[in-house]
Image: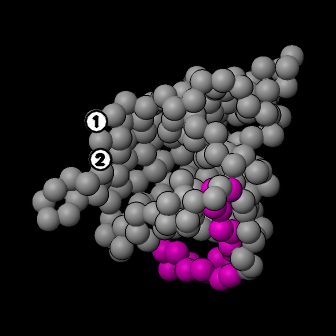
Amino acid sequence: KNLKYLEYELFLNDDLIGSHIFNFSKKGELLYVNTRGQFKISKLGLNLMNYQTNTEEIYEKGQLLKFKSKTNQNDKKKYVNLKFNKSEGIFEVDGSSFKGKTEASSIVGSWWNHEIIKKNKQISAVSGRIMPQKVRFLGKKKINLNNQTYNSLHFHLLSDDNKPTEKKKINLHIWYDSETLIWLNMSYDKIGR
């Protein structure tokens, strides 16, 4: 792919609350993905959530080598510093919620990367927490975005734990373009749609 830029508007119950921007660049065999995102949720003049994040991902031939994130969520500083240990074939994670190692078959929760639907373990892009996940394919669907119709593949991702659905850390629907596999849309059921 020669993808250079993706920009998403974030909505909560049809109200624009923020954006998430992805910039892609290649240097030799390396792919760099830099993102910045922000959103704010207010109700009756009270700030319920204020969120800003910046990340960098570095890949070589599809293998994630490094991931860094700095996030401010309601004035709480969160971070992830992840690197791939080639000799051991594992990820080493230094995050605000997890410090340790995990299998290279895990994936960072970065929605632009459709490989996330093939994995059973997700690494939080905000805190480094390791979360088992289940992915269910819900079918092909035509969706309209910005007055354009896309053929999409619809997936539901859920935490693979014994918690009730409303308490799961992962509970989202995601749509990818059926031809290009570019991320089209997502709804996160935990805080609204």
- In this rendering, position of residue 173 left or right of residue 9: right
Residue at (62% x, 30% y) in the render: 67
Taking the view exactly as shown, the residue that stands out farthest to the left is: 45
- Find residue 27 and report its image quarter: top right
Characterize the local packing of mark 1: few (<14), some (14-19) or many (20 or more) Cα atoms within 10 angstroms: few
- Find residue 86 and report its image quarter: top right
- In this rendering, position of residue 191 left or right of residue 151: left
Q: Which residues are magenta?
A: 141-160
- In this rendering, position of residue 71 left or right of residue 112: left
Q: Amino acid at mark 1?
A: Asp
- Find residue 59 and report its image quarter: top right
Say which residue label 1 marks.
Answer: 75
Instruction: Provide residue 189's location: percent of width, then percent of height.
Output: 49, 67
Secondary element at image label 2: strand
Q: Which mark is residue 50?
A: 2
Residue at (69% x, 68% y) in the render: 155
Q: Are marks 1 and 2 in contact (CB under 8 Å)?
A: yes
Residue 146 colored in magenta in the image: yes
Does residue 66 appear in this view?
yes
Instruction: Provide residue 192's location: percent of width, then percent of height.
Output: 40, 69
- In this rendering, position of residue 175 left or right of residue 63: left
Prevailing SS of the magenta stretch:
strand
Instruction: State whether residue 77 is above or below residue 146.
Output: above
Does residue 68 appear in this view?
no
Characterize the local packing of mark 2: few (<14), some (14-19) or many (20 or more) Cα atoms within 10 angstroms: some
Residue 86 colored in magenta in the image: no
Q: Amino acid at mark 2?
A: Asn
Numbered label tally: 2
The image quadrant where one finds the C terminus is bottom left
Instruction: Provide residue 143's location: percent of width, then percent of height.
Output: 60, 80
